[in-house]
Amino acid sequence: MSSKTIVVKQVGSPIRRPAKQRQTLIGLGLNRMHRIRELEDSPAVRGMVAKIPHLVRIVEERG
């Protein structure tokens, strides 16, 4: 089990975005503007963030 985490903030709106991008935001637990989540730093989470770099920002890396 990894103790590394990343803090992700939603900075873009999902309005007028493809359904896959909206589903990726929901998968990350982000569905409203300026919401912040602390997530496990795993390849799956990093891949999701890489798919929507225009909608989210990595604020901090912990661990």
Image (cartoon, rainbow, N blue to C red):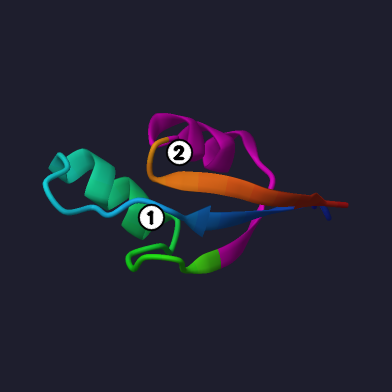
Q: Along the horizontal axis of the image, is 51 left or right of 5?
A: left
Residue drawn at point x = 34 percent, y = 68 percent: 32
Residue drawn at point x = 55 percent, y = 43 percent: 45
The residue to which callout 1 is attached is 27
Can you say whether 19 is above or below 27 in the image? above
Image position, residue 38 (x, y; %) = 64, 63
Residue drawn at point x = 57 percent, y = 36 percent: 46
Q: Amino acid at mark 1?
A: Gly
Tell me the tag on residue 48.
2
Image position, residue 42 (x, y; %) = 65, 41
Residue drawn at point x = 23 percent, y = 52 percent: 14
Please, what secondary structure does the residue beneath circle 2 have?
Answer: helix
Q: Which residues are magenta?
A: 37-53
Query: Mark 1 and mark 2: span between their CA atoms?
Result: 8 Å
**Labels 1 and 2 touching (C-beta < 8 A):** yes
Residue 6 within the segment the image draws in magenta: no
Q: Along the horizontal axis of the image, is 57 left or right of 34?
A: right
